[in-house]
Amino acid sequence: MVTVPPPEQAALWSRELEGREPAEVIRWAVAQFGDGLVIGSGFGKDGLVMLDIARKIRPDIPVLFLETGCHFAETLQFRDRLRHDWNANIVDVRPELSPAELEARYGADLFARDPDRCCALRKVEPLQHALRGRRAWMTGLRRSQHAGRGQTSVVEWQELTAGGGLFKVNPLAGWSLAQVEAYLDEHHLPRHPLWAQGYPSVGCAPCTSPVTTGEAERAGRWRGRGKVECGIHATVAPPTRMVAEPVVPPCEGS
Ligand code: SF4
């Protein structure tokens, strides 16, 4: 029997699943990976659609939420609402160091001085740790979110820094923002309160600003810093930083 290496297996699956409805892809992933499948979500519009479809297929599917210590209060309240109203199995994934320990070791306002390191400590490393031992994770990535995600496949292989890796499933890869918003409307999904206040994409508070009419949906993320990704999707686009600017409010512990 010929063993197919994981990256090639991901490409084969991707070709089979390209163009399928997100519900079909999620049903396939649940059947394929069983208890080894988790969702990664910060409860953006895309993640919420994915979670709504997934919870109707497998209600107890674990949802990894990166609790960076830097979120808007509204995001944490939205997370708690989903826990309560949907009985969502949300797992808070925290950095190894507490906010106070991070500040003691790296100084205050690391997000302003070195956002790549801040993302590595608060997002990338905790997620890598949480994904160890899993077979696959699902994300809300769409090709239409920005140019760096334009090559996103339905199934990808993601290496872990500690060795090994796992499959990454992107059920909404081929969807547009309009399709996502139509799903939110048709299924009467709850709304993150900041979406209506000019924040179509909500990340950590110090690194998210509102967008104006006509701006890209992620234009408010790390605005003015030349950084478009935190690094958790490093196979899609490595994080970059060109210009630092002081931003507020601070994270916990700062
Ligand atoms: S998004 Fe900003 S605050 Fe959040 S981890 Fe990255 S640099 Fe730090």
Image (spheres, rainbow, N blue to C red):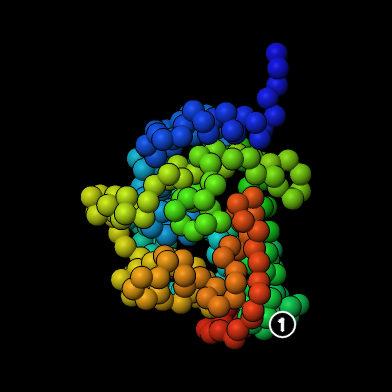
Q: Could you tell me which quadrant the C terminus lies in?
A: bottom right
Q: Percent position (x, y) of residue 207? A: 53, 75
Return the residue nearer the eye: 103 or 242: 242
Q: Percent position (x, y) of residue 105? A: 76, 77
Res 149 seen here: yes
Horizontal placement of 151 versus 7: left or right?
left
Asked whether mark 1 and ligand 1 are closer than 8 Å, the reply comes as no
Horizontal placement of 104 versus 127: left or right?
right
Please say if 121 is above or below 54: below
Q: Percent position (x, y) of residue 88? A: 41, 51
Q: Quadrant of residue 96?
A: bottom right
Res 34 seen here: no
Residue at the image position 65 percent from the left and 58 percent from the top:
238
Please say if 118 is above or below 12: below
Return the residue nearer the eye: 119 or 62: 119
Q: Residue at the top extreme?
A: 1
Please say if 31 is above or below 173: above
Give the residue number, with chain letter if any, for mark 1.
107
Q: Percent position (x, y) of residue 170? A: 49, 44
Q: How dense is the environment of label 1, judged by Cα within 10 Å: few (below 14), some, or many (20 and up)?
A: few
Horizontal placement of 70 versus 212: left or right?
right
Residue at the image position 68 percent from the left and 25 percent from the top:
4
> How many labels, in total?
1
Residue at the image position 24 percent from the left and 54 percent from the top:
185
* SS at mark 1 in the image: loop
Q: Could you tell me which quadrant the N terminus lies in?
A: top right
Horizontal placement of 225 versus 145: left or right?
right
Residue at the image position 74 percent from the left and 50 percent from the top:
161
Q: Amino acid at mark 1?
A: Gly
Return the residue nearer the eye: 34 or 222: 222
